[in-house]
Image (cartoon, rainbow, N blue to C red):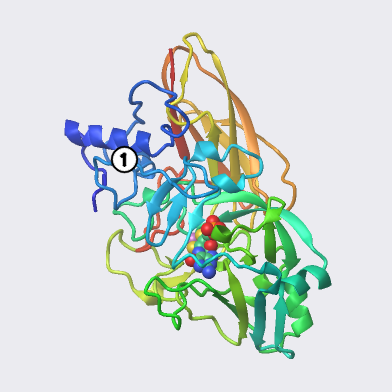
Amino acid sequence: MARETGGNTADGNKFETSRRRFLGSSGLAAIGAVIGGVLPLSRDGGGIPQARAQAAPAAAPAAKGPQYLKFPGKSEGLVVLGEKPLVAETPESLLDDDTTPIEKFYIRNNGQIPEEAKDPDAWKITIDGEVNNKTEITLGELKSKYKAVTRRMVLECGGNGRAGFSPPARGNQWTNGGAGCAEWTGVPLADVLKKAGLKPAAKYTAHYAADLHLSGDAGKPSLSRGVRIEKAMDPNTMIVWAMNGKPLPNIHGGPVRLIVPGWAGSASQKWLTRITIRDREHDGPGMTEFSYRTAIKPMVPGGKADPANFRILESMPVRSIITNPANGAKFAAGTKELKLRGASWAGDLTVRQVDISTDFGANWQRATLVKPKNKYDWQRWTATIKLPTDGYFEIWARATDSRGAMQPHQAGFWNPQGYGGNAMHRIAVLVG
Ligand SMILES: Nc1nc2c(c(=O)[nH]1)N[C@H]1C(S)=C(S)[C@@H](COP(=O)(O)O)O[C@H]1N2
Ligand SMILES: [Mo]
């Protein structure tokens, strides 16, 4: 793969390459060249994954730099990680809004993007399997027969943070931008399942959708994941048709999708057509072998993986990002204080604490956490840091979840498809 894998960086060319990459991928071009030249983040010659965490997509040729998205209704600041299927992430500095605007929300597809529905309210969803009453309900009926709720909740790709792994893990090389927090309007899935009547054998859901497999084979789902019935019955798991008060855009699964907050985004089926209740763990595409699974017993990075040693990734790990200033920001000489803003979240848990360091992790100060709107909302944070002199500084942010788990310095517990990478976020700034 054409990407920096760390190791000794005495080689000047290699270092130049990596500098260009983490600058390029930070969204600087999109926000109008806040700095004049390159501003590298420190490396320790092997262990610290920052260069990798900020690296460009693995597939991109070294000299090319990031490719910015061109898609109707979407910000050109999003970075394309893959074109077929279309995948694009949001640089951290574009996640500075309390509610992520639709135009800045990341995109993750596994198959072809369906055509926009002509008559959204006629869209049908089937509930079958281990239920007493097989149900077919239109979106129009969902809206009129059930009580709608709106919640602000994080949606995060299971592979978020994957670019931090060394050796590189298989899949889209997300930095921290496979996440966003939007206002979702819809009905709790539990309300619909209760009406259908779960049989005692009901153990797991299986989600199906209208997007075709990349091959175009209509009999082959591009992705079909499911969740334990307890998660499906959680009142925060929703069938939604609106995002930030607007009809759910086609690219985000409109007219109707699932939102399974706190868990790998792949469970949040877009273009939802059917939920089959199963009496056992689902085994659709995306459920088996190393997909959305992490190692039970830690394995040798890059080594041979044994499928029997893997379990399904459910709740996502704790993460924090610095959303302002942007990586590479430059400040006037004599600037002694900077106000920081960021966001943090922790899957099914909450964030207990966010800490900031301006001296490479020697000392830490606590950020102020803003109260979330509801469960599964992200927790915005602010902090004011003092800078003793002009010059180059790095700002590191790390969050700790409600059970005490803290973000590590580097993505660990390597697994073939790179889940659970939640290394702390770092940015570089220049004063004077
Ligand atoms: N039908 C369908 N649903 C899907 C996907 C998909 O490819 N097809 N991708 C999943 C993955 S992996 C993620 S991370 C989220 C991304 O949602 P977004 O594109 O709205 O950000 O949708 C999930 N739902
Ligand atoms: Mo995902």
Q: Is residue 112 above or below residue 23?
A: below
Q: Position of residue 112 (x, y in %)?
A: 44, 67
Q: Nearer the viewer, residue 412 or 264?
A: 264
Q: In the image, residue 70 lies at what x, y percent?
A: 44, 47
Residue at x-position 69% and y-position 66%: 238
135 on left or right of 275: right
In the displayed structure, would residue 197 be above or below residue 72?
Answer: below
Q: Foreground: 3 or 73?
A: 73
Circle 1 sits in a helix, a strand or a loop, which is it? loop
Residue at 51% x, 75% y: name it. Answer: 224
Q: In the image, what residue occupies the spot 65% across and 50% down?
A: 182
Q: Residues within 10 Å of mark 1 (few under 14, many from 20)?
A: some
Q: Is residue 108 above or below residue 336?
A: below
Q: Is residue 107 visible?
A: yes
Whether residue 316 is visible to the viewer of this picture, yes or no, is no
Residue marked by disc 1: 65
Which residue is found at the position 72% from the left and 79% from the top?
A: 137
Q: x, y (%) of residue 269?
A: 57, 68
Locate the C terminus and report the quarter of the image it occupies.
top left
What's the residue type where badge 1 is placed? Answer: Gly
Most foreground residue, 424 or 215: 215
